[in-house]
Amino acid sequence: MNATTFRPVDVLRQIESRFGAEAETVGATFEAFSSLGCEKGREGEPDALAKIVVQIIGDAPFTDADSALRLKFSAKVGKPVMIDITASSAPLSVDAETLSLIESFGGTFSQSNGLSGNTVKLSFPFADAELMQVELEETSQEETASLAGTRILIADDSPTNRLVLEEMLADTRAELVSVNDGKEALEAWQKSNFDLLLLDISMPVMDGVTAIREIRAGEVQQSRAVTPAIAVTANALVNQVADYLVAGFDTHLAKPFRRKDLMHAILTLLRPSVL
């Protein structure tokens, strides 16, 4: 096999482009996340890597609107490229051909079942690209910005989504507080001060729109400073985003999103105090 320099995030986007439209057709949930390091170069075969993931997912991952597929790529410098694939309904399969491809790269896989569905974890020891090649893919100032001293409140009813956000922000040195729904977010805000709110929209008990309305009303009543807030949601049609802004959000992030999108949104709201 002929190795080439590639970025794991580009492989993720290639897979996303294939399955995103299929999910929209039936109203299913499809989320693709990349963590720090996926923008940097690796030595390997991106087409073969994409083929492995696609073969594991199969031809029909979305059976109805309740179906959900989540992909997470992680590629910290000096560490293997890690890929998590979770499907809520359609089974994930590692056949003989796929296993042979995985092993040809020195990769490993494990499979498990949990509350979120069937999960396959892949690990590939793709070497970091040579320094000169990596420099061609310079990381932006936003990607490497420190959020030290910043307190961020994350609210999402999905443990997987909370974990993904926490991993995306793990190297920023921000203090992260994660809760399960809008009611818990409101209670956390009432007890403490935060520099930024990352609130999912569709949550049980209290949704994100209700939570931000309550928080904005509380800020007025208590003469508290306005806390920047980002709506994190898969429901991002123009009219929906307009409703989020009217309710009190400052901006939104449409799922699935990349780490650089998250950092850009955060730093846009926090400047100039962070940079």
Image: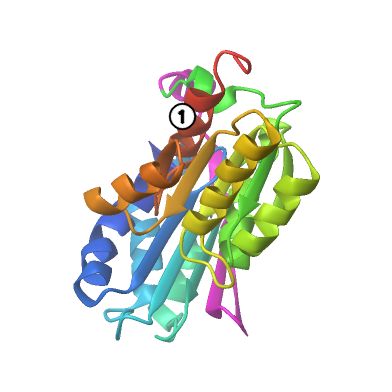
Give the colour scheme shown.
Answer: rainbow
- Residue toward you, 167 or 205: 205
Q: Which residue occupies 74% across, 47% down?
A: 190
Against 171, residue 117 (above or below) is: below
Above or below, comparing residue 61 to residue 47 in the picture:
below
Q: Which residues are magenta?
A: 109-136
Comparing 205 with 153, the one in front is 205
Tell me the residue at 68%/35% (across/down). 171
Q: Toward which corner of the image does residue 123 lie, by quadrant?
A: bottom right
Q: Which residue is under mark 1? A: 264
Q: Residue at x 37, y 58 (%)?
A: 234
Q: In this rendering, does residue 107 appear at all? A: no
Please state the horizontal and vertical placement of residue 34, each as a whole percent of the image.
Answer: 49, 48
Q: Is residue 247 left or right of residue 169?
A: left
User: Three-letter amino acid code at disc 1?
Assistant: His
Q: Quadrant of the C terminus?
A: top right
